[in-house]
Image: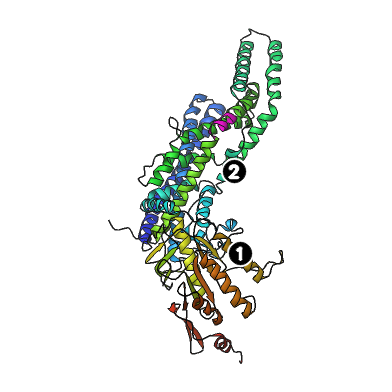
Amino acid sequence: MPRPDPRTAYTERIARLDVRLAFGERQHHRISNLRLALFAAGAAVAWAAFIRASLSPAWLVLPAVAFLALLVVHARLLNSNERLLRARRYYERGLSRLDGTWPGTGPDGARFLGAHLYARDLDLFGRGSLFQLIDTARTEAGEETLADWLRAPAGAEEVLARQVAVAELRERIDFRETLNVLAAEAHVSRTGVLTSWAAATPVGFGATEARLFAVCAVVTGLLVAAMAAGWVSSIAVVLWLIVPGGVALAHRVRAWQVIRRVDAAADDLSLLEALLSRLEQEAFTAPKLTALHGRLAAAAVIRPSARIAQLRRYIAARDALRNEFVRPFGLLLLVRSQAAVAIDRWHAEHRTALAAWLTAVGEFEALASLATYAFEHPRDPFPAINADGPVFEATALAHPLIAEGSAVANSVSLGGSAPSVLVISGSNMSGKSTLLRAVGANTVLALAGGPVRAERLSLSPLAIGATIRVEDSLQDGHSRFYAEILRIRDIVALTEGKAPVLFLLDEILHGTNSHDRRIGADAVVRALVDAGAIGLVTTHDLALTALAVSLEPRAKNVHFEDRIEQGRMVFDYTMRDGVVERSNALELMRAVGLKV
């Protein structure tokens, strides 16, 4: 069957959601009016029963029960309407991506930038970034997993496994919608706090403490009941309460430690329970998806969602003490201490599994993000992964952050039978840096397991290094040139790793004089090529095009051109063989009115 057009699919789903939302809103108003009518009827019955004494007070039961039932129904309806609104927002954001209005909306992942060899250079994070375009995850675990995949290229086997998983989820629009809607229950899904709690060492309560608190609670309950029946005196009960009081006091510090720890993680347990319950109901065919699903089935007899529900009940028992009516009974029965023991024992038994469940949820969300991107770009193919490298062979490659209608595609071949290095000359603004970013961004997408913006791409696993956006640092006292050579040092160091290096060097060493630049660039590129790396080097200094001649046939000169038409600079952004034959600097200065 042909794949559905993403814009049509999203528009149709929004229309269906609008119908359901309109019905839900009408139901909301009906129930609100009915609640008001029941309240008025209850008030009338109360007046007749207590003021006029013409009715039995028992008549109040009927409107009271009906009112409470409507409260439950109304709460469920409001929750259903809220989920419909979240689903609508999910598809509206999808349309914004298709329309190109998405930059600046949604999480931008700027917190993942850090000190990285190419994240800033390739616009992986931040406003209008690759992360902001792809990310549909609503939990910290999902966002962190997707960010990790973008920052760290996977091996060939893992990439192929992700491709199969993404291809399966691409067709499952309903599943991706439900996953997003459930994960959006909380405004901030702090699964990172749950992960930290799972990694923490339990306090160490065991079966002994559990039995001790239970015995104290049972004896207290029996004695209070006996006192109420007149079988024992109140003095005996008061004397006995010294025992459970002392037991609770002896364990008070550790119990509070358990409570404080779980309090930080408790807010998102209902979210995690809902996500796990939904994932447990699914069946998958892709090996990676079935393996992830298997992690959730590792609990065998009791499902992970049921385990989380059990933990939530323990926490709810502790929270019951916040009710002023319940608190005295809770204190007598050592409810807080018993809840602390139960929580700590749950933590000790399931913390490893909890970490695995959170990791699985994060991977499902990351795969769903890539699947959504694949669905919205049906013409973008999955790349072929070549285990033998280094190699990068692309036909009609374009930048994924540039609108498909305006992006200019170029074919790029590196490694294998092609040269290891392309030395790209050309004037300012002609497209040199954009080509580097296109190669880098598509490599990131490919090795994360997603589709690429090209007619065809075949590549091997590669470690990426780039100097496209190297900046000076006043705080560290580094000039731009010094920051660049530090980055180049790190890229050269990458060649000692297992994966071959893809280097993207923009305007190499342009912060120094032409003599040192030529000698330094020749030494750097030669060292990288001798170490088995492949890559692109751009320059507007035509003297550096001698690099390709000195490294021939392992290097090749290519260029971008421009022309002046009616005082305006015109670019076609098409890469051609050879060295650029003209510079636009003087023409550009004249075009803005400088007399040179």
Q: Is residue 339 left or right of residue 154?
A: right
Neighbourhood count class around disc 2 (C-alpha, 10 Å): few under 14, some 14–19, many 20 upward: some
| Coordinates of residue 523 in the picture (x, y in percent) | 58, 71
| Mark found first going from the N terminus, 2 or 1 | 2
Residues packed near mark 1 inside 10 Å, few (<14), some (14 to 19) or many (20 plus): few
- Magenta residues? 343-350
Magenta stretch holds residue 162 = no
Q: Position of residue 249 (x, y in %)?
A: 71, 24
Q: Which residue is mark 2?
A: 193
Q: Is residue 118 left or right of residue 556?
A: right
Q: Quadrant of the C terminus?
A: bottom right
Q: Quadrant of residue 507?
A: bottom right
Q: Quadrant of the N terminus?
A: bottom left
Disc 1 marks which amino acid? Arg
Q: Amino acid at mark 2?
A: Val
Mark linked to residue 489: 1
Of 312 and 351, nearer the camera is 351
Tell me if I can see residue 431 in this picture.
Answer: no
Disc 2 is placed on an element classified as helix
Nearest the viewer among 254 and 118 is 118
Q: Tell me where residue 201 appears, x and y as whole percent.
A: 62, 35
Q: Position of residue 590 (x, y in %)?
A: 57, 89
Element class at badge 1: helix
* Label placed on residue 70: none
Q: Is residue 117 left or right of residue 175?
A: right
Residue at position x 43%, y 36% in the image? 297
Q: CA distance from mark 2 to mark 1?
A: 37 Å
